[in-house]
Amino acid sequence: MTTLHDPRRASTQPDPAPHAAHTPPPHDTGNSGPAPRTAHSPYDGDETTSGRPSAPSTAWQPLGGGEWRGGADHSDAPPPSPPAPAAPPVPMWHRAVPNRPPRPPLVWLVGVHGGAGVSSLAASLSWAGDAGQRWPARIGLAGDLDSPLVVLVGRSHLRGVNALHRALLAHQARATPAGSQVVGVVTVSDSARPLPIPVAQRREEMEGLAVALGARTWRLGWLEQWRALEPYEMAEWDPAAGGSPVDDGDPTRTPPQPVRLLAEQILTAARIAGARITERAQQGAEPASP
């Protein structure tokens, strides 16, 4: 299992470009020019892609990145368009995720609505944590912090698919905790019957957005065995136990085969994502050569 280490790395953003000296254009003697500015704001003449600069993050580089750009001050330029309204922040834990297992989870399962199936999945994966319907916000590489790796979980009905889509849009708009990384999304079937065509199309759109954001997509089919079990009764899959156990048909002893296959794929993707984060952190922690 990949272990995340604390790089003690702080991310910074470049300062806005300094203002160039501005010489007002000459005016006709018969016409009065625009009234001179009586006070100068440090943001006058600077245009950004997302409004006024915010304080730099001290933990992780948020999704998207980008540099602030200083713009020239033209008196005849049209007024800038108002900034787009910021997306509301997602529900998040501002303290450590409660009910953490003894071994810190490699990845957190976050349900985008009630009844998404997070508790059942977390009970079946020994290395995954159940974050309920909130994103971990106290994240980092230190041992007392939560993992930044997240897998979003929702049902395959229209409500669940739409909720997954909204969560991905929020992540794209940086309305999720800074440093969070969505490893993938899981849609859990809500019925043994095929999806209606409009819902299937909507799921394709949602999964396309997930892929565009660098996440994986998984689909877990209908599991009749789970209907008669509480999460604590479900068998747990642990990669340390070796190969996948033989499915003997009893979900209290071995996880159903679709769950084991899903677990192996999520674990592989989470390990790759964790290794990349650790590598970037170690590179940033290395002292610059003279």
Image (spheres, rainbow, N blue to C red):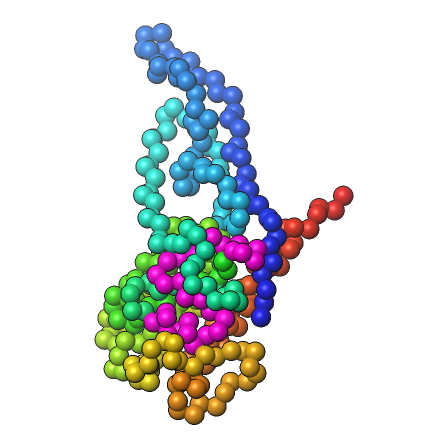
Furthest toward the top, the residue is: 29
Residue 67 among magenta residues: no
Residue 269 x/y as whole percent: 51, 70
Q: Residue at x 56, y 78 (%)?
A: 240
Where residue 150 appears, x then y in whole percent? 45, 62
Q: Quadrant of residue 206?
A: bottom left
> Vertically, is 162 above or below 171?
below
Name the residue at the right extreme: 290
Q: Is residue 79 left or right of residue 126?
A: left
| Residue drawn at the location 40% of the way across and 62% of the way down | 131
Q: From the viewer's perspective, is 81 left or right of 277?
A: left
Most foreground residue, 102 or 281:
102
Q: Residue at 51% across / 85% down in the picture? A: 244
Place residue 221 in its image quadrant.
bottom left
* Magenta span of residues: 117-145
Quadrant containing the C terminus is top right
Image point (69%, 51%), residue name: 286
Image location (x, y in percent) of residue 173: 38, 50
